[in-house]
């Protein structure tokens, strides 16, 4: 290393001083926030006990200090146990953050305690009350001739299929497809009639609304409905009679729905299929499977053709097919992460995705035109300011999202997505495009769905695990049973419920996303704990003023602080999302490949740290 100028050291000293001042300012900001008694909620952490006092090391980095616990507030907690803390005194200058232990979760090394701690931290109801359980016991789960006679179309002799993951237990959708001689299709989507069993005004319905959605935490599910409903009478199990709400859609050669019918039905699923098996059938890659399912091959081949047709039309309309890989995390029998990989999506997944989107659009359009009280799934146009900021970054890469009259359309985004296909920057730009979009949510007013380029959209296809679906099923059923004649008084009641339930459901969904993301981050960090000093190739996924994020091929993401990036001072260019070395002129941009070494993995804090290799 050559000699450095006095100017360089002066700048480094200045930067160091700025860094220290920033930390001080950050702490003062925390103190100011705490002086205002901002509710920090339930905090999970690890209890460390001394003789006359203890402290809790928070699992979240949002709480920047340990929490002091006086002896009277131990609540029976033992050293090194996972606990939930409630703040009793906010931190001020010279005084620590104080709290009391309100719940002891268990020993840190006990199987499943990590996930249970997350559940407790978010205060998620994971057990059903005795009142709900008793109510479920009294639900008649036998399907009688009287049920069939209640204006239901009997489809029990039709060949109908469910297609899900191998481990799925709550099967709420089944499909069938017919191809006609003129090249058109009829798509039938059958959804479990959950509203027939979960009645308004019951404890079960109140609990479903309170939960809002099922939460999927890798090795466990916190269901919206008890298993007797979700995995039992409402699950479209093979060979069992089930009550359903159905949508039949006639689709032309261009993938347009030309006519549709929504009706109550009863079905008996012919075969319970998995994505992997259907994928092997439509790709003709497994002779044994082709032989086993020979009587049904035409069904799956027709499904594949129709799905391609629907996808082609949707993409032409501007559907944002962003290639953002999901993670597949494998746990052992004790719940420990033993593998992390990309979750592979195949053509069988796309069949169900296209069919469910089409059914959701059809139902939403039908009831919007009826001006019925409803809950829609909306996704509004992104803020133009955010699009303009993204364009500043895209410009250097030779791309641009067109903005016309201070508006942007899905097709404008789609053009960029098509341009980056197969290029090294595809993944990073896809991620940035996704971050530019607004968050989808539920509302009682139809505002369209930007991401799927649809004028009408709702969630109709998963009433077992989402409350908005259950609510609109109830509305649809009433319309069908009363020949679409509903009193204004009932409509007014439903409209108030739609507004209230949409807001609650959006909030519950956000909470579910956070806890699912935290569970993934925790298990990814756990998986990397024994990979310290291992070297990997990665891609820079984020650039900040204090370091860079790097994502590995297996979807694990870690952070490199400046001191582990190189022996230089790095200036941050926010517009270009780039770091530039002052002395070396080395650059770090989003999308650049980089070789890293793992230097830290903290499961409790859900933190993974890297260092740039060959520094």
Image (spheres, rainbow, N blue to C red):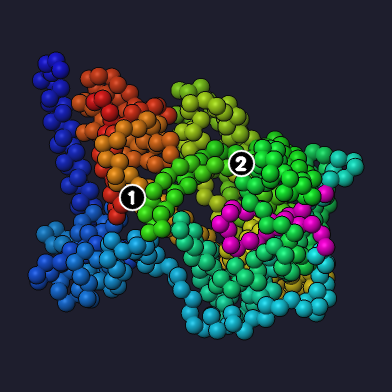
Q: Is residue 535 above or below residue 245?
A: above
User: What's the mark number on residue 346?
Assistant: 2
Q: Dividing the image into 4 quarters, which one contains the C terminus?
A: top left
User: What's the mark number on residue 526?
Assistant: 1
Give the residue drawn at x 48%, y 26%: 424
Along the viewing direction, whichever of 209 and 530 lies nearer the viewer: 530
Q: Is residue 37 above or below residue 337?
A: below
Q: Is residue 234 visible?
A: yes
Give the residue drawn at x 59%, y 73%: 228
- Classify 10 Å Cα crowding around label 2: few (below 14), some (14-19), many (20 and above): few
Q: Tell me where residue 99 appears, x and y as whole percent.
A: 22, 69
Secondary element type, mark 1? helix
375 on left or right of 300: left
Q: Tell me where residue 524 appears, x and y as whole percent.
A: 37, 47
User: What's the mark number on residue 30?
Assistant: none
- Classify 10 Å Cα crowding around label 1: few (below 14), some (14-19), many (20 and above): many
């Amino acid at each position: 290393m050559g000699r450095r100028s006095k100017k360089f050291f002066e700048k480094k000293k200045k930067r160091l001083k700025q860094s220290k001042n920033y930390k001080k300012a950050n702490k003062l900001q925390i103190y100011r926030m705490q002086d205002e008694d901002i509710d920090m909620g339930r905090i999970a952490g690890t209890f460390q006990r001394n003789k006359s006092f203890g402290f809790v090391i928070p699992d979240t980095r949002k709480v920047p200090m340990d929490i002091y616990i006086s002896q009277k507030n131990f609540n029976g907690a033992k050293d090194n146990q996972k606990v939930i803390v409630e703040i009793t005194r906010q931190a001020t200058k010279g005084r620590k953050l104080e709290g009391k232990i309100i719940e002891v979760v268990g020993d840190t090394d006990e199987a499943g305690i990590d996930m249970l701690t997350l559940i407790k931290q978010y205060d998620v109801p994971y057990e059903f009350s005795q009142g709900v359980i008793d109510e479920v016991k009294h639900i008649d789960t036998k399907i009688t001739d009287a049920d069939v006679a209640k204006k239901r179309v009997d489809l029990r002799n039709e060949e109908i299929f469910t297609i899900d993951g191998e481990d799925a237990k709550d099967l709420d959708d089944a499909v069938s497809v017919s191809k006609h001689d003129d090249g058109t299709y009829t798509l039938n989507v059958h959804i479990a009639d959950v509203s027939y069993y979960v009645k308004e005004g019951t404890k079960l319905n109140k609990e479903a609304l309170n939960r809002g959605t099922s939460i999927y935490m890798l090795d466990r599910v916190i269901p919206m409905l008890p298993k007797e409903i979700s995995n039992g009478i409402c699950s479209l199990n093979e060979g069992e009679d089930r009550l359903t709400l159905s949508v039949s859609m006639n689709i032309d050669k261009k993938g347009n729905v030309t006519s549709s019918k929504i009706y109550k039905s009863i079905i008996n699923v012919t075969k319970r299929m998995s994505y992997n098996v259907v994928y092997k059938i439509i790709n003709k890659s497994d002779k044994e499977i082709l032989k086993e399912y020979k009587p049904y091959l035409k069904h799956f081949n027709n499904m594949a053709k129709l799905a391609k047709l629907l996808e082609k039309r949707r993409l032409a309309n501007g559907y944002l097919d962003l290639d953002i890989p999901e993670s597949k995390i494998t746990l052992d029998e004790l719940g420990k992460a033993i593998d992390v990989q990309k979750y592979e999506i195949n053509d069988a997944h796309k069949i169900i995705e296209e069919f469910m989107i089409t059914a959701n659009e059809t139902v939403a359009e039908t009831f919007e035109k009826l001006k019925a009280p409803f809950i829609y799934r909306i996704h509004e146009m992104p803020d133009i300011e955010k699009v303009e900021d993204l364009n500043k970054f895209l410009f250097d890469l030779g791309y641009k999202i067109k903005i016309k009259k201070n508006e942007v359309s899905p097709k404008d985004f789609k053009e960029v997505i098509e341009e980056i296909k197969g290029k090294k920057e595809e993944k990073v730009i896809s991620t940035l495009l996704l971050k530019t979009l607004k968050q989808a949510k539920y509302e009682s007013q139809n505002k369209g769905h930007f991401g799927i380029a649809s004028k009408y959209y709702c969630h109709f296809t998963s009433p077992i695990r989402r409350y908005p679906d259950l609510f609109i099923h109830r509305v649809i059923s009433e319309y069908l049973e009363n020949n679409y004649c509903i009193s204004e008084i009932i409509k007014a009641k439903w409209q108030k419920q739609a507004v209230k339930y949409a807001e609650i459901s959006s909030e519950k969904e956000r909470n579910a996303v956070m806890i699912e993301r935290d569970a993934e981050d925790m298990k990814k960090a756990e998986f990397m704990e024994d990979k310290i000093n291992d070297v990997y190739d990665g891609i820079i996924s984020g650039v900040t003023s204090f370091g860079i994020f790097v994502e590995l091929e297996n979807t694990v993401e870690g952070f490199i602080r400046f001191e582990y990036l190189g022996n230089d001072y790095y200036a941050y260019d926010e517009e270009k999302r780039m770091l530039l070395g002052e002395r070396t002129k080395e650059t770090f941009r989003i999308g650049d490949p980089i070789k890293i070494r793992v230097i830290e993995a903290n499961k409790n804090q859900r933190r993974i740290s890297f260092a740039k290799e060959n520094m």
